Image (tube, rainbow, N blue to C red):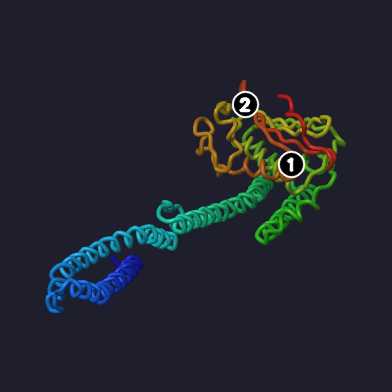
Amino acid sequence: MSGVGARIALGALAVAASAIAIVTIGVVIAGGSAFEQLMQEHGESVATAREMFNESVGGALTAAVLGAALASVVLAVVTGRWLAAPLLRIRGAAHRVAEGDLGVRVSAEGPEEIISLANSFNQMTERLEEHARERADFITNAAHELRTPLTNLQGYLEALRDGVVPPSRESFASLHEEVDRMVRLSRSLDALAEGDVARRTAGELREIDLRAAIVAMSVELASPALERRGVALEVRVPTGLRARANPDHLAQVLANLLQNAVRYTPDGGRVTITAERHDWDIVVAVTNTGDEIPSPDLPRIFERFYRVEKSRDRSRGGAGIGLAIVKQLVELGGGRVGAESASGLTRFWFSLPISPRRTTMAAPPNS
């Protein structure tokens, strides 16, 4: 035993030794004088009284002192180990945290103060682990946010190079708009790093023409990938349909859903984009033909890093966060998301508020 346990034991021994010394001195000095006086009153000499005291009281006192000393040593050692053990565990856990093991936890045992210390340590490691996970998610999400427009640009440039899409002023305008969106994305990431997203995002919601401002651009950017796969695209979005949204976020949502649809639609399949106005919101849906998502997986499909490990597995590509980003961006704008998959069709939908004072009240009907 060393360290704090040894110091606690030594302190307990010092207290016990002081108590034994005081009792011994009191018995020897005060008790001896009283014993001699009593014996003299009964006719015994001082020498005889002293000898009787030493033989009776002195022997018993010596045995008592030795027993008390031994008991003090044992008690001090046990107490020291009992108090030091949880502290040593916390120290060991702290060393593991310093080496990068943020999953370590300590058991809350011992006196109330040490239990409180252990609970505080566990709370600290939980917060550190959560911050580390958020940092890793942030890096992954940032890469994914930038990968989507880069993929669109790459597909469009390859289509221009191969002659699939003729070069035109409109084509280059679309490419320029996608580059501008990447610039705005990088600025948003800077704001996110500064912890200022919530304040800045609220002011970015504005009324937009859904088809003219977002759907047309998203379809144009996704068209090269759809054409290479022979996937038919149908758009059923009324002209003049207006909703409140962040244009950049909405473009990212549609880009992610279209990219997801292209990935999981078989060659020669079909992708459909629809938008319907309800009482308090507009519901936009992207539907594709192909393998269905199993029912047990649907409730978790929007979870970050969740993958369906059956027909829609990781061999199709993707990092498992595209739909999580869709959910996050839609909810940030006051909407909701959902998914259905049956009869060879998979439908992802999200809602957009019509008015900033109204919210989504009911789930949209299946298409």
Which label is found at residue 220? Answer: 1
Q: What residue appears at the point 67 percent right and 33 percent down from the top-left corner?
A: 338
Which label is found at residue 159? Answer: none
Of 325 and 48, the residue lying toward us: 48
Left or right of 42, for residue 307? right
Q: What residue appears at the point 74 percent right and 55 percent down from the top-left corner?
A: 180
x and y percent of residue 154 in the render? 64, 49
Q: CA distance from mark 1 to mark 2?
A: 26 Å
Mark 2 element type: strand
CA neighbours of label 1 inside 10 A, class few (<14), some (14 to 19), many (20+): some
x and y percent of residue 45 in the render? 14, 77
Q: Amino acid at mark 2?
A: Ser
Residue holding disc 2? 341
Quadrant into which the C terminus falls? top right
How many numbered circles are shown?
2
Badge nearest the viewer, 1 or 2: 2
Q: Amino acid at mark 1?
A: Glu
Above or below, comparing residue 284 to residue 118 in the picture: above
Of 163 and 305, the residue lying toward us: 305
x and y percent of residue 210 in the render? 81, 39
Left or right of 114, for residue 73? left
x and y percent of residue 299 in the render? 59, 32
